[in-house]
Amino acid sequence: MPADLMQTVVPGLIEHIPVTLVYWFVPSVLSLLFGTLLCIVRVGRHNILYWICTVYISFFRGTPGIVQIYLVFFGLPKIFWLVGIDINDWPAGVYFIIATTMNLSCFMCETLRGGYLGVDKGQIETGLSIGFSRTQNFFRVIVPQTLKVAILNLKNLEIDVLKDTSVAFTIGAVEMLGYAKGVIAASYGAGQLWILGAAAVIYFVMCAILEIVFTLASHRMERYERRTA
């Protein structure tokens, strides 16, 4: 990469890391909440909500994420317009966060459900037998054991979400890759390989850090379980 291009592009990419992290972190937190609710309904299997959630999850798992982003970006303003609310001035990033949350909630639900089904039911019964209420049993037994089983899958899911923030620019949300594409367009393609390569290196470093964090969390949970065993 030419020195002058490096001095301009790399700091610009770094400046857009916080935006990229917001597009990753906010959907991750929201989808953990919504995914947990979906998981509770899916595990119950006793009412109409189960079938509604099943159809919802099947749709979002069975259609491309980029299509879902476009549906939210173009469709949500029309839905709100029907009730007299104008949201056309919302930033593009808000639509991306909404679409990503709706998608990620489904995968989060199935990941947590798999973790729950992998929990030894004897531990759940033991918690109840020693006097835990259902709420105490949920937070002290079920949640920790579910996370222990699901944490590696959650790691892979979160890394995928971080990488998928790179498609936010398709609806005009300027994150790291959106900035890179803007620079490439402004320079008529000059140095695009170097620019995209620099962006790729930054994405790689962020994903590597995220993987380390989840690996350390997994080891910490294992040590805690051994101490309390």
Image (cartoon, rainbow, N blue to C red):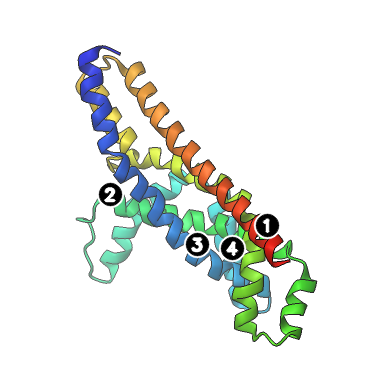
What amino acid is found at the position of numbered circle 1 in the picture? Val
Select label 4 or label 1 by which is in front. Answer: 1
Question: Residue 221, how many percent across, how many down?
Answer: 62, 57
- Tell me the kind of residue under disc 4: Val
Q: Point out the image quarter for the N terminus.
A: top left
User: Alpha-carbon distance for marks 4 and 1?
Assistant: 26 Å
The kind of residue on which mark 3 rests is Leu
Frontmost of labels 2 and 3 is: 3
Residue at the spot of label 4: 55
Of tags 3 and 4, the one toward the viewer is 3
Label 2 sits on residue: 92
Query: How far apart are labels 3 and 1 at the CA level?
Result: 16 Å
User: On residue 149, which mark appears?
Assistant: 1
Q: Is residue 190 left or right of residue 162?
A: left
Left or right: 121 in relation to 214: right
Give 141 or 99, whichever is nearer the viewer: 141
Q: Could you say whether the residue bearing mark 2 is in a helix, strand or loop?
A: helix
Q: Indicate the secondary structure of the residue bearing disc 3.
A: helix
Residue 27: image location, x then y, percent: 42, 55
User: Comparing marks 4 and 2, which lies closer to the viewer?
Assistant: 2
Q: Residues within 10 Å of mark 4 (few under 14, many from 20)?
A: few
Q: Is residue 210 visible?
A: yes
Q: Nearer the viewer, mark 2 or mark 1?
A: 1
Quarter of the view holding residue 20: top left
Label 3 sits on residue: 32
Residue beneath the point at 62% across and 66% down: 144
Q: Nearer the viewer, residue 167 or 158?
A: 158
